[in-house]
Image: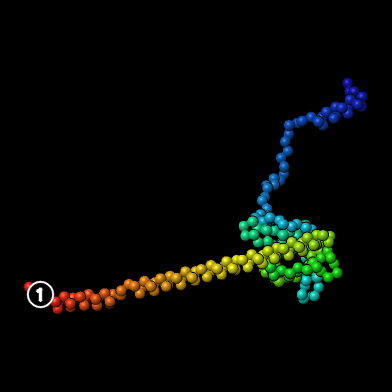
Amino acid sequence: MASNDPDREEEAAAAGEDEDTGAQIAPIVTLSEVAVTTGEEEEDALLDLKAKLYRFDKDGSQWKERGTGSVKLLKHRETGKVRLVMRQAKTLKICANHLVVRSIKIQEHAGNDKSCVWHASDFADGELKDEMFGIRFGSVENCKKFMEMVEDIAESSGKNEEKESNDAAEAAGLLHKLSVDESKTEEKASEKAPTASAVKAEEKSEAVTKAEEPSKN
């Protein structure tokens, strides 16, 4: 006999819904974990700030937006060299990629204390190009922090390059000195050592002298 109690019917329906049937549903697509390399694995971030990057178009004589994202100053753990890298926020496409060298001169953009400009040999497009960049930050503090760090790195890079050139000059001078000393040593040795002709002449002279000596008998 069927029950007319609606509460019992709802409880029975709920129990049926919660009952574990033991069925297992396998996923339609299985995704495997893929390791993504960025090229930044051997570098440490000295600075990471959000900004908007611009590139000066020489043909059109105007600034063009390059991308909005994070600009980083990355120091290589082995070489100690620092490069500037910026990627677009959504696509992660590289819009700036160049070394921070002593020739870089960064300055505040006229009329905007949140922006600054600089020239660089950039490799973002897969080949070196002489570019003029402009970058705008969300605050004056971030812009100053960026400028000061770039200037410090450029100055430090200049000192390291000068030291490397001095070391190379000293090494070249040392090698030259060693080669000169070796040549002098060879010259002195040749002066002291008798030549083969001199030895033969001396042997011949001794033989003649012995032949001319009177017999003691």
In terms of depth relative to the viewer, which is nearer, 157 or 13? Answer: 157
Outermost residue to the front: 216
> Where is residue 209 drawn, in percent x and y?
17, 77
Quadrant in the rendering for residue 50: bottom right
Q: For residue 35, say whether it is visible.
A: yes
Residue 206 as seen in the image, left or right of residue 195: left
Relative height, residue 21 to residue 128 (above, below): above
Numbered circles on residues, count: 1
Residue 41 as seen in the image, left or right of residue 142: left
Query: How is this picture coloured?
Result: rainbow
> Where is residue 87 drawn, in percent x and y?
74, 60
The residue shown at (68%, 61%) is: 82
User: Label 1: which residue?
Assistant: 215
> Where is residue 73 drawn, in percent x and y?
72, 60
Mark 1 residue element: loop
In terms of depth relative to the viewer, which is nearer, 126 or 142? Answer: 142
In terms of depth relative to the viewer, which is nearer, 149 or 66? Answer: 149
Q: For residue 69, say whether it is visible.
A: no
Quadrant in the rendering for residue 217: bottom left
Residue type beneath disc 1: Ser
Outermost residue to the top: 1
Q: Quadrant of the N terminus?
A: top right
The residue shown at (76%, 75%) is: 58
The residue shown at (40%, 71%) is: 185
